[in-house]
Image (cartoon, rainbow, N blue to C red):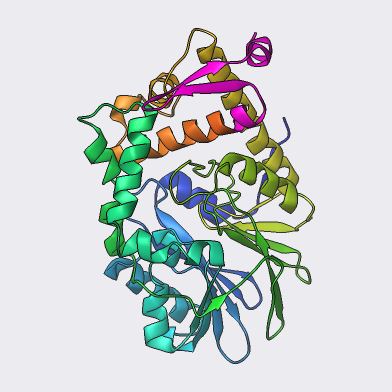
Amino acid sequence: MATIEVSGVLQKRAWENKVLPPVEQVRPGLWSIPVPMPENPLRYVLVYVFETGTGLVMVDAGWNTDEAWQALNDGLHEAGGSITDVEAVLVTHIHPDHYGLAGRVREASGAWIGLHPADAVLLESRYSETTELIAKMTELLEASGVPLDKRPDLANASMEVRGLVFTAQPDVLFEDGQRFHFGGWDLSTIWTPGHSPGHVCLWSDQHRLLLSGDHVLPRITPNISVHSQQFPNPLGDFLDSLAKIGAFSPDEVLPAHEYRFKNLGVRIEHLIAHHEERLIEILQLLRLGGATAWDLTNSLTWSRPFDQIQDFMQRAANGETLAHLVLLEERGLVHRSGGHPFIFTCSDAGRALAS
């Protein structure tokens, strides 16, 4: 299978050495600033900063810790600016490592914050009034077959990240295809739901650059989960979104994690193949008999033994399993029965495909 070409060589070397990569000038007037994420396997988020002639425009912001804030300020200084120069923060999606510091940046600089409306509508229930969110997650875990004694830990597993977000409502809601011009830079939004309902990539037609957020990363696959704050078929949306950005031909992809790369089409093929392999793996398990989502999650292949994975990641894994099951239902390859928990079984077509 063809491979991508790594263009962020220093970033990849830093990734392999498990250290923070350097601040880099990606193009004249465009900088990459790594903002640390301690005690997280992703290690850092890459914040991109555009020089506009009158100030700076950021894409994503990092999460809200003093260490991240200091790293962002230091990176802006190394790029020749400061936090007070920031005019806008374009956020690819609402997860804490992308949205967390946006409000703090606005408070310090007066910058406006942009976010897709499908994510903006989730902010309050996700980071402020979370009682209903926890209740819905508990119900989903019950329907998945998660044991009663494990549900509270999994349902509350994401609550600790609320402190990593400086809660702030966006000033601008950008829809699909919205265009921005900042000095010599052109950017347009590409709505790519899947990882979150309102995830966007940013495309510069003039400079042939794609800022891919978490939608396409060079090494790992983004988490695509069924949960109460997602569209009904998030994996289907994600695969459609991959096809959507496949129509573009960037000279380079600037992801929010890991390192820059080329050959977007090759990476899209890898991601599609990964999910198709996972779909087949689930069908092969279901050929042995009906199972709950949690049963399947415990039986699937993961990067390490499932019982060694932290609660938050176990919940995310169960959500991924559900996302694959929903897509299999859409394709007529799986049926579900019962209620709490749901039992999934292969259809005749599913058994034929898995054989």
The answer to whether 77 appears left or right of 118 in the picture is left
Residue ID at (40%, 47%): 18
| Quarter of the rendering containing residue 142 | top left
Residue ID at (44%, 21%): 296
The answer to whether 257 appears left or right of 347 in the picture is left
- Which residue of the protein is positioned furthest toward the front in this rendering? 338
Q: Is residue 229 visible?
A: yes
Residue ID at (42%, 49%): 42
Q: Position of residue 312 (x, y in %)?
A: 32, 42
Q: Position of residue 135 (x, y in %)?
A: 30, 47
Q: Position of residue 319 (x, y in %)?
A: 44, 37
Q: Is residue 92 visible?
A: no
The answer to whether 330 appears left or right of 76 in the picture is right
User: Would you place residue 312 above or below residue 282 in this image?
Assistant: below
The tally of labels here is 0
Does 188 lie within the magenta span? no
User: Would you place residue 301 above or below residue 184 in this image?
Assistant: above
- Which residue of the protein is positioned furthest toward the bottom in this rendering? 54
Q: Position of residue 244 (x, y in %)?
A: 74, 51
Does 350 lie within the magenta span? yes
Quadrant showing the C terminus: top right
Q: Nearer the viewer, residue 279 or 6?
A: 279
* Range of magenta residues: 327-355
Residue ID at (66%, 31%): 273
User: Would you place residue 160 above or below residue 280 in this image?
Assistant: below
Quadrant showing the N terminus: top right
User: Would you place residue 8 above or below residue 288 in this image?
Assistant: below
